[in-house]
Amino acid sequence: MNIMDRFANADEYEKTIYKKTMTHKEACLDYLERFGSITPLEALSAFHCFRLAAVIFKLREDGHVITTKINEGRDKYAVYTLMKEGKEHDG
């Protein structure tokens, strides 16, 4: 998925789906279930979360299998992907 598609998803999520009553953990899991992956900038845009890594940590503690891939392009950032049951993971 290219960066413009990611921001379009985040913008649409923030405008139509995100509810201010959702916790960051609830919003992040919902976003991952809808789109499969998330970056820190998407989390900031979609549901105003500055600490995505901490939210991912909590979701992993709850038993969700989420992989981390570091994008090493011009800008370095993490891409977190929710794994479906039965797939291998990194942690």
Image (cartoon, rainbow, N blue to C red):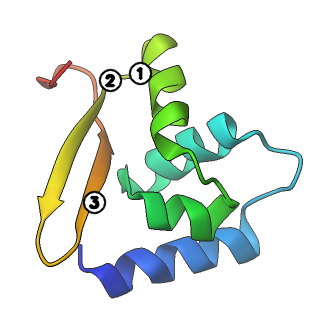
Instruction: Decide which of tag 1 and tag 3 comes sooner along the chain.
Output: 1
Q: Position of residue 9 (x, y in %)?
A: 49, 74
Residue type pointed to by label 2: Val
Mark 1 Cα shell of 10 Å, populated few (<14), some (14-19), many (≥20): some
Q: How many marks?
A: 3
* Quadrant position of residue 19: bottom right
User: Judging from the image, what secondary structure is the residue with disc 3 in?
Assistant: strand
The reply to whether dot 1 and dot 3 touch (C-beta < 8 Å) is: no
* Residue placed furthest toward the right: 21
Residue type pointed to by label 3: Tyr
Q: Residue at x 46, y 25 (%)?
A: 57
**Residue beneath label 2, please?**
65
Q: CA distance from mark 1 to mark 3?
A: 21 Å
Mark linked to residue 22: none
Q: Nearer the viewer, mark 3 or mark 2?
A: 3
Q: Nearer the viewer, residue 29 or 55?
A: 55
**Residue beneath label 3, please?**
77
Q: Position of residue 65 (x, y in %)?
A: 32, 23
Task: Say if 56 sits above or below 24 in the image.
Answer: above
| Quadrant placement of the N terminus | bottom left
Residue type pointed to by label 1: His
Task: Say if 9 sits above or below 26 in the image.
Answer: below
Q: CA distance from mark 2 to mark 1?
A: 4 Å
Q: Position of residue 79 (x, y in %)?
A: 28, 53
The reply to whether dot 2 and dot 1 touch (C-beta < 8 Å) is: yes
Q: CA distance from mark 3 to mark 2?
A: 19 Å
Mark 2 Cα shell of 10 Å, populated few (<14), some (14-19), many (≥20): some
**Residue beneath label 1, please?**
64
User: Judging from the image, what secondary structure is the residue with disc 1 in?
Assistant: loop
Q: Nearer the viewer, mark 1 or mark 3?
A: 3
* Residue placed furthest toward the bottom: 4
Q: Residue at x 17, y 46 (%)?
A: 69
